[in-house]
Amino acid sequence: MSDDLLNEKLIAAKEKWAREGRGLTGDVAQNLQRLPAGQHLVQGLPVLDLGIQPDLPLKEWSLTIGGMTERTLKWSWDDFMAQPQVELTCDIHCVTTWSSYNNVWNGVTAKHLMQTAGIKPEAQFVMLRSYDGYTTNLPLSQFAADDVLIAHSWDGKPISRDHGGPVRVVVPKLYFWKSAKWVRAITFMEKDQPGYWELRGYHNNGDPWKEERYW
């Protein structure tokens, strides 16, 4: 099966889930509840993507940070690894109803990235862009949370290609489609713009405890 055909079938299936409200229970959980409504626990991280997994040698990878910023940055791999590194442990919740506890990530915090670029007061939203053409949007307030990471390692090892390596974003408080794999650009915006799945029936915010799966 060709990548194009696989891509089309995966996209069609997820659009159908949005139309049917797959996984919705109507049982809105409290944030104090660890497992959001409609979720079930799994071990590790299942592989979900658009059917394309970019092969990115470290010497060819770069991350561009710009938009409503005082400085436009373009980090090479060496630049990225020279930034202050942190380790964070978090749970992950995917809109396809699986959750995974206690994932350990290493990387650079979104807060450090924002401080380095100098975010302008007008910036209210963020667009994440990936090497496979994927995009997803989120409010600046969500991206600026203490636990948001631009990650290069998962559970003590470099993030593998199928899980979004060499670098992916991790936004634990939102459904996992907001945590873009193979990230290539982070753009700060004055006005919101829908991303890839947001244009195809998925919720603009994506809070698991509010069951914000679809529009």
Image: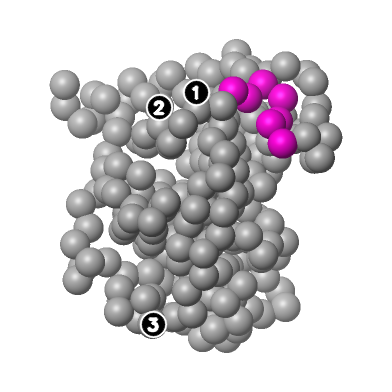
Asked if the residues shown at circle 2 and circle 1 are in contact, with their CB atoms under 8 angstroms apart, the answer is yes
39 is within the stretch colored magenta: yes
How would you rate the neighbour count of disc 1 (Cα within 10 Å): few for under 14, some for 14-19, many for 20 or more? some
Q: Residue at x 41, y 53 (%)?
A: 154
Q: Which mark is residue 82?
A: 3
Q: Mark 1 — residue?
A: 15
Residue 97 position within the rendered picture, expressed as x and y whole percent measured from the top left: 57, 24
Q: Nearer the viewer, mark 3 or mark 1?
A: 3
Tell me where the magenta segment starts and ends, as one range: 34-40
37 is within the stretch colored magenta: yes
Residue 6 position within the rendered picture, expressed as x and y whole percent measured from the top left: 26, 25
Residue 24 position within the rendered picture, expressed as x and y whole percent measured from the top left: 68, 19
The N terminus - image quarter = top left
Q: Say what secondary structure mark 2 lies in.
A: helix
Q: Which one is nearer the viewer's eye here, 127 or 84?
A: 84
Alpha carbons under labels 3 and 1: distance apart: 40 Å
